[in-house]
Amino acid sequence: MTNPEPFEESGMTFGPFPPGCAFRIEKSCLYQAMSGDGSGVKVAEMLLLRGSSEDRTPAIWIIEAKQSFPRPTSRADFEKNVERIRCKLADSLSLFFAMRLGRHADALAELPDQFQAVDPGAVDIKLVLIVKGHREKWLPPLNDMLNKALRPLVRVWGLKPTAVTVTNDDGALRHGLISAVGVT
């Protein structure tokens, strides 16, 4: 599912992205088959390949978008939602590498050529949560909790300590992830 065209998700318009640099993993045939078989696998919205020029190490951004997120004052809802995000980001990472390494028949062919060309041992990984309309002051506690929840994954995969990022639609706009925010 290469998709350089902008698409709507969680009230935000993602893209446009260079051809072959965005992969809507939640729309992949492999994930669709898994999600229908009761496996419990959950994935993020998309993978975005960035910095693949000769002068920069390529990075795959695994991006989950949310329309809203409970404030840290509602501890039970907050922790439950952090766990859901952790699962989606972790499953997306695992599913990408399973596809990239050819662990599922025909799944490698689903990945755009640019993703197939990435050296799995040398690519940086960034785990990104975007929460539309989330206030700046609410981002640090959410970032801290998600970092804590993803710490084992970051350690096991040898990711950079800065691999986990939580931002809002303003930050996503600054990073060129979205081009517009809807009112819904």
Image: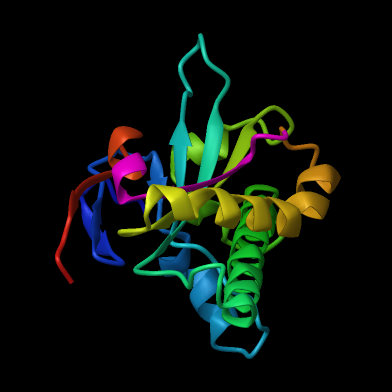
Q: Residue at x 47, y 24 (%)?
A: 51
Q: Residue at 61% across / 68% down in the picture?
A: 82
How far from the left and from the top, in percent, is residue 86?
65, 64
The vertical placement of 18 against 86, above or below, is: above
Q: Quadrant of the N terminus?
A: bottom left
Between 51 and 134, the one lying in front of the other is 134
The residue most toward the top is: 55
Q: Quadrant of residue 112?
A: top left
Query: Viewed as shown, does residue 50 lie left or right of 75?
Result: left
Q: Decide which of 87, 4 is in the foreground and name it.
A: 87
For the C terminus, the image quarter is bottom left
| Extent of the magenta region | 161-171
Tell me if residue 129 can be seen: no
Q: State whether residue 42 appears in this view.
A: yes
Q: Is residue 158 above or below residue 23?
A: above
- Tell me, yes or no, whether the highlighted magenta stretch contains residue 14: no
The mark total stands at: 0
**Residue 39 picture location, percent across and down:** 68, 84
Image x and y of residue 33, in percent: 54, 80
Residue located at (40% from left, 47% from top): 136
Scheme of image coloration: rainbow
Please state if 26 lies on the left or on the right of 154 as rendered.
Answer: left
Question: Above or below — where is 98 with respect to 50?
Answer: below
Say which of 45 and 128 sits in front.
128
- The image shows residue 139 at horizontal and vertical percentages of 49, 51
109 or 134: nearer the eye? Answer: 134
Residue 163 in the magenta stretch? The answer is yes
User: At 56% from the left edge and 72% from the top edge, which residue is drawn?
Assistant: 73
